[in-house]
Amino acid sequence: MKKLVIKENMIVGIKGTGIPKPQPNLNTDDILPARFLKEITFSNMGNYVFIDERYKDGKEVKEHPFNDPNYKGANILLAGENFGCGSSREHAPQGLHRFGIDAIVAGESMAEIFWGNCASLGVPGVTVSNEELAKVVDYVTQNPKSQLDIDLKKKMLTYGNQKVKFNIPEGQRESFVTGLWDVVTVLKHYEPRTDAFANKLDYLSFL
Amino acid sequence: MSKGTLYDKVWKKHVVGKLPDGRVQFFIGRHLMHEVTSPQAFEELRERKIKVKRPDLTYAILDHVIPTKCRTRPFKDKKAELMTATLESNVKQAKITYFGPGKGQGVCHVVFPEKGIIWPGQTGACGDSHTATHGAFGSIYLGIGTTQVRDLLATQTLALDPKKDKLKVKRINFEGNLQAGVSAKDLILYTINKLTVKGGNGFAYELSGSTVDNMSMEERMTMCNMGIEGGARVCYVNPDDTTFKYLLGREFAPKQDFRKAVQSWRKVASNKDAEYDSEVTINSSAVEPMVTWGTSPDQAVAVNQIVPCTKDGLGLIDPYEALDSCSYMNLIPGQNVNDIEINVAFIGSCTNGRLSDLEDAAKVLEGNKVKVKTLVVPGSEQVKYEAEMLGLDLIFKRAGAEWRNPGCSMCLAMSPDTLEGYNVTASTSNRPFKGRQGQETRTHLMSPAGVASSAIEGRIADPRPYLMRW
């Protein structure tokens, strides 16, 4: 079988500014509190990311990175070790993505299910050592408007004049660079063969 | 590896082709949906400007959140109203057949078979774990998650992993006649108790043998419905004349091609020389009316027994889990299950909300009075109509039970029928899980006749003395 590539979904790298949220073990309830699971769609999830930290007693917590104007428009989240642990709910990655996060750089590891859920939304999650992450967070805090570059082909993160290798599960990396991370698009790609198949399925034509 | 079984044949018939990641693209002949698991999928399609691929193969219903007492819109519960309005606008926009209130509404797994939508040899899927019910027709029906609902709406196919999703096949041979007063529900509770809730993991269950051959479609549906409680994601019965007779003349069943359809349906049954990955035989004539005493569907005993406390009594049930269950249910190992007092009885659900279930309950209730709050909830508007034509509603009302409108009702805490405070129920539903019927509620699963006799006595009771009258 010829290797399939879906061009419009290819993600070979992410460029943009960073937003630091480096505490370790932040779980999906921290990211998106359970009370918002009641909503029947994901539409508003972007508004609820870290909402309990961002607002205390009805007042905006100015220094929270997700409120800080310095990080406005940032699309690369710098997260701590074991980011996204806890419940497997999809609301957390949906919320981050809808807030504007396009990629996550985490320390050491990321929670498995969360990692997979991010991948299926087209949000690459990559990990570096905790020491390395601390350096990146430091740099971004000093230079919030400086561009970061995540290169999925070379597995390389560039910040300032520093380059650092990162880890990402090979299956996920492959699905990003070939554009196959989105199941719907892949299945849709095979529409002609599906139609031909359905035309021949006997019971679909029983009158 | 199984060979020549219905499961193997129907699986093979629906593989469209390979996918680059090693999975296969699998065609789904019927997509069934309800209000709870579909809104996110529709929303994503809208955001991505993708149209519903096969609205002609998609059928929708309102069941989980609909109140069974007052159905006037808007519903009091704002979230239920929003879910309902969202479903209705989604199906209208996509031109999907919808069985709304007044149009044949009811519990999805009761209505779709009743309409003649489910046929042998099909594949089907629904964002609901009790979808295996439809395997009773000799088909593969899968319970799926919201992401898969989206894939299905967009492409009428699913990406399945042949290593994980292609199941092994275990044939369960049910041999012998059921005793008088023992129902399909008792037989499946007995089976799950013997094989445990994990017994079916990785397996499709083929239910066969003389007992199943002699069962009506409604009884077969009750059996397959609970297959998932035994861990089997797929559960099916080979189609036979009982299946074809059930389908003949139903609204969505083939009409002019019916003869042709039957010829094709006969071929999907497992071959005589089919090979199975595993096989087990159950002696159906040994089964007595059953009741679950714990918080897991496999923690069940006969109604005249004790809450098990010995290794023999427990069988394959984990003793630590049994203790945990007893403590939650406020039971003492060794006590008679007859001594368990109940204060609520529920007859209905996708397991036992069909006409024959209501008839069973009515036989027990006729001329008697219930001691506890008792809800009788028909599985569909059609069932309700038929029951009323037969006068069953009068029997229920005279006995002091409430006769309601169709819906999932008290099976799970999503409608106004959700129980509040400490309650002990006898229920014809399918899951005795902690909190399923209400935060503090303890659930005992039984057959419709068993729940009816328990309602009369206010404690777990054997229905047979009441049935002997006839």
Image: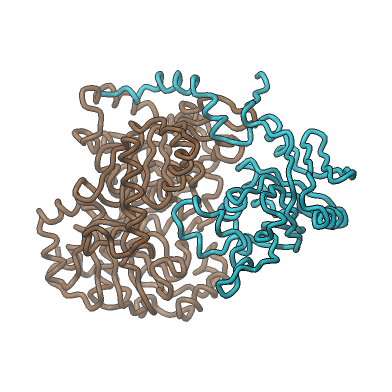
Chain colours: A cyan, B brown
Q: Is residue A186 above or below residue B144?
A: above
**In the visual, does B85 lie left or right of B385?**
right
- Left or right of A47 in this view: B374: left
The quadrant of the picture occupied by the C terminus of chain B is bottom left
Residue B24 in view (yes/no): yes
Q: Position of residue B409 (x, y in %)?
A: 31, 62
- Give the x, y percent position of residue B149: 46, 42
Identify the residue shown where x is 32% and y is 22%. Answer: A205
Q: Observer-nearest residue: B360 or B376?
A: B376
Residue located 76% across and 53% down the image: A106
The residue positioned 33% from the left and 41% from the top of the image is B91
Classify B328 as above or below B40: below
What is the number of callouts on the image? 0
For the residue pair B29 and B74, the one nearer the viewer reads as B74
Which residue lies at the image location 52% right of the left edge and 50% below the top edge? B200
**Above or below — where is B344 with respect to B39?**
below
Image coords of residue B184 (percent x, y): 32, 54
Quadrant of the frame with the N terminus of chain B: top right
Image vertical order of residue A197 relative to residue A158, above or below: above
Residue B226, image x, y percentages: 41, 53
Residue B387 sits in which quadrant?
bottom left
Question: Relative to residue A54, is residue B60 drawn left or right?
Answer: left
| Residue B288 can be seen, yes or no | no
